Amino acid sequence: MMKRKRSNRIPLSPILKRVKLYFDLLKRSTDAYLYVEDIPSKIAMLSPNLVQDFDLPNEVMENLHERWAQLIHPEERVAYETSFRESVEKENVFDWSDEYRVKTRKGEYIWVRARGRVGMDEQGKPQLFVGVMTRMARRNQADEVTGLLNKYQFERGVKAALANWRATQEGGAILLFGLDNFKIVNETNNRSFGDQALKHVARAVEKILPEGMTLYKLDGDEYATIYPGAGKQEIAELFASLQSTLSHPHTIDGRPFFCTASAGTAFYPAAGKDYLVLHKHAEAAMDFAKQEGKNRNCLFTKEQYNRWVRSISIRDAMFSSVENGCEGFSLFYQPQVDARTQKLIGAEALLRWKNPKGRMVAPMEFIPVLEETKLIILVGKWIFEEAVKTCKKWRKIQPNFRMSINLSYEQVRDLSFQDFVLTCLEAYHMPPDSVTLELTESKIVADWSFVNKQFDQFRQSGVHIAMDDFGTGYSSLSSLKNLSCDIVKIDREFVKEILANEFDRELVKYTVALCHSIGICCCIEGVEDDDVFRLLRDTCMADSIQGYLFGHPESEENFEKEFFHSGGVMPELPPEERAKW
Ligand code: C2E
Ligand code: CA
Ligand code: CA
């Protein structure tokens, strides 16, 4: 039997009287539990369902929050008390939302999702607290850590949005976002810090969502929201405010925490008329945002998706290639010649990869995947050793032969690489100056002093360093002053039109002169034409040349046939060495 409630004994405060009319209208129009509290007097007005379901004394009562806290499950009580107190006390926190178990009249716990807002008086003092609580049918509606609705609820929400689109033709968007480098946050602190960070993000982002939108928590560090009626403009604005919210550091356990987010957006119905497809496309867009450098939002497009699918399949295939001892990888070699004598002085080792179906994949396509997955650290060691072996073999024919090997920035950052290089050279009894390491200039602008330190150590041990693709970075000329290298490789960009373009000609000439003045040699890349070659040699004073004019990248075998067996500009193979091949 339900207890009968006594009549109101506590009178409404003046402010509650003023809002009573609205409150009465509201409580009849929703199943949610409602209450309004006059903060200074602690008198609250409650909806009848709240009184009944939780056996509260009356529709007007004092000290609601103290009483309510006693009904909350002990596991959630402290968090409730702290977050509620903070929301009222800290005058800059106006919103509050939480999820917890609360004991009903029948003595069983149910999950409720509670939201509240503090209203201020003219002096800016907290005056009213308006609260709404909804009952959650099953616990698995809420995410354990953040209290946000979980992925199943997101699915339900997306399906409802799609049904709405079918009925009204109003489309919209779903936006997924993940926190960048959250794993590091977790690893460098602890699990509970990570959980709190996820909660903080949830609370902060909820505040910036447009009216009526819900934030959901998916797996791991991912969140999602549904934005009915949104176009590109609305999504761009939403992401911008997400970025600015996250850029403020939060304090957790006295430690500052801030992070960026990578988001993916899929518009419906264009990107999918069904939940699974739409979700998959938004996920792909988010993955793409991460691949493109994080802290950005990518909008799903078909072309991008196809590229993404391709990079995923490359990624998978590369992992198995590496697991199988770098199966499918090989090195091609492109000759480098002395500009004056046109004699072979060395070669650049260029990585090639055949996918499991036996098709050659372009380096521009697979090298970024190797870098992003950090597989380049493993494959780079394989490349180095293979190139050194080949160099050793070719040095028997041409003793001063020099091998150029490309390095990715990830390899420079890997502190074990330097030891590996020196140990490998020693193991093959190769002098360090038989190899040149090439690093692309444009990648290192961020971290000059670190890179220079590494380079100095390489150079002290005798290994040569080349600055690759010179001229394509942001700081080219100023980097000449800072960098610690032996060779500068001027990019093909400046050579392509050098015959017609006087500016390029002057620039190359000036750069070579500048390099020479500080003892750096210049290699010019991408030379395809005899006239260009002459110009570079006679006017620009280049030291060495690499380009199709003297040879395309070739397999080891073909390189040998072309440059060591055929005579030509290259030295003849000694008879005893030729016999070995
Ligand atoms: P890169 O280091 O600038 O290598 C030179 C690229 O220019 C090579 O492309 C080469 O085939 C091409 N090339 C050479 N001469 C000419 C020419 O006369 N005309 C034209 N049009 N192109 C010419 P490739 O082999 O496709 O390699 C592309 C890029 O992939 C390389 O650019 C390098 O950044 C990267 N890469 C290749 N192998 C490796 C490697 O072993 N490790 C790393 N980290 N990156 C590599
Ligand atoms: Ca190179
Ligand atoms: Ca280059």
Image (cartoon, helix red, strand yellow):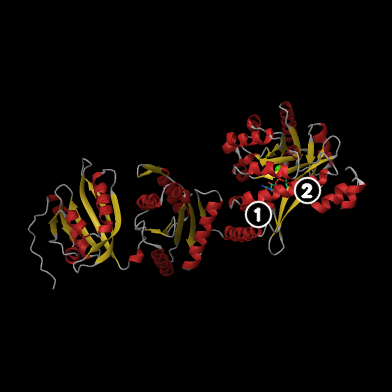
Q: Residues within 10 Å of mark 1 (few under 14, many from 20)?
A: some
In the image shown, does 378 or 267 lie closer to the viewer? 378
Q: Nearer the viewer, residue 546 or 501?
A: 546
N-term-proximal mark, 1 vs 2 = 1
Left or right of 257? Residue 468 is right
Quarter-wise, where is residue 448 in the image?
top right
Q: Which mark is residue 366?
A: 1
The answer to whether 367 is drawn above or below residue 54 in the figure is above
Relative horizontal placement of residue 260, taking residue 470 as reference (left or right)? left
* 575, 310: nearer the viewer: 575
Q: Amino acid at mark 2?
A: Thr
Pinpoint residue 323: horizontal percent, then vertical percent.
64, 59
How far apart, in angstroms, are the residues tagged by discs 1 and 2?
23 Å
Image spot of residue 10 (x, y percent):
8, 56
Task: Identify the secondary structure beneath mark 2.
Answer: helix
Q: What secondary structure is found at the residue carrying circle 1? A: helix
Q: Is residue 6 above or below residue 461?
A: below
Residue 103 shows which numbered tag? none
Q: Which residue is most to the right? A: 575
Disc 2 CB within 8 Å of nearest ligand 1 atom: no
User: In the rendered image, which quarter is residue 423 located in?
Assistant: top right
Amino acid type at circle 1 is Phe
Percent across and percent down for residue 548 are 80, 46
Residue 247: image x %, image y %? 43, 43
Q: Dots 1 and 2: beta carbons under 8 Å?
A: no
Label drawn at residue 390: 2
